[in-house]
Each structure stands twice: as C-alpha cells, then as structure tokens.
Amino acid sequence: QVQLVESGGGLVQPGGSLRLSCAASGINFDIYTMAWYRQDPDYQLELLARITPPGDIEYTSSVKGRFTISRDNAKTVYLQMNSLKPEDTAVYFCRADNMNTGRYLWGLGTQVTVSS
C-alpha cells in the first residue's frame, strides 16, 4: 500500500521538544525528496524542511536552528523539534516528491499543540 504515516505529535509545553516520524511504504523511498510541512489553525500551509535522497537539507527561516530533519534506511523521515513555541501549533504533514516524475504523496498529518 502506498502511503505516508506520521506519528509523534501531541501536547507539549513551550520550550519543550517533540520528534515526529513519517514512515513510508509502497514507494522507492531512496529516490524521493522528503519534506515536512505544517498547516496552522488559520489553514496556512508552510514548508518547514526538506531533505533530498543524497541528504541535502534546507529549512525555512522560522524553524532553522530549532528543527532538524533526517532520514534513515528504514524508509522513515524524522523532524526533531526543539525550543517549541505556541506559534508552532499546527498539523504537521509529511510529503514525498519524486523530482524526476513529478509524482508526490502526502501523509494524513499529526497534530502538534504547544501550550502551557
């Protein structure tokens, strides 16, 4: 079955940390660029971080220095989130892109709430 499944979201206090995971199945993971997005309560979608198959990484400025994206050989991409702020509250989505074919795939998302 072709799918991306996110996990690791939850409620955390400001300043806390969470680690999100995105497990891929049914795709050749090694050729896909993987990315994390989030959609805030106002439904604004933001690209947070992206990692290519060779491991090139880019971050949006709002999370650079606080979030870390990584991928492993078990078809999983991670987002380590530190120093979380209330404005990080959002639904976090994983996306896989095949840059050669244009094919892409979204996960269903995981909720992250940062609140005291």
Image: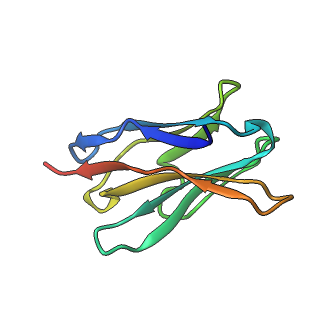
Judge left or right: residue 24 versus residue 88. right
> Of residues 64 and 49, which is closer to you in this image?
49
Q: Nearer the viewer, residue 82 or 10?
A: 10
Residue 69: % across, % down: 58, 43
Against 114, is 60 above or below?
below
* Residue 66 image position (x, y, % from top left): 47, 48
At x 49% / y 47%, what residue is drawn?
67
Query: Residue at 71% across / 40% down in the picture?
Result: 27
Q: How many tags in the picture?
A: 0
Placement of 24 over or under 86, stated as above or below: above
Image vertical order of residue 22 relative to residue 56, above or below? above
The residue at the point 67 percent across, 37 percent down is: 26
Quadrant location, the N terminus:
top right
Is residue 45 placed above or below 38 in the rendered structure? Answer: below
Name, please, the residue furthest toward the right.
Answer: 100
| Relative side of 10 to 56, left or right | left
Q: Position of residue 41 (x, y in %)?
A: 28, 68
Q: Residue 90: where, in percent of width, then height?
A: 33, 59
- Quarter location, residue 87: bottom left
Toward the viewer: 108 or 18? Answer: 108
Residue at screen point 50% across, 50% down: 107
- Lateral position of residue 89 relative to residue 103, left or right: left
Q: Residue lying farthest left? A: 116
Q: Residue lying furthest top in this view? A: 74
Q: Quadrant of residue 28?
A: top right
Q: How is the image coloured?
A: rainbow
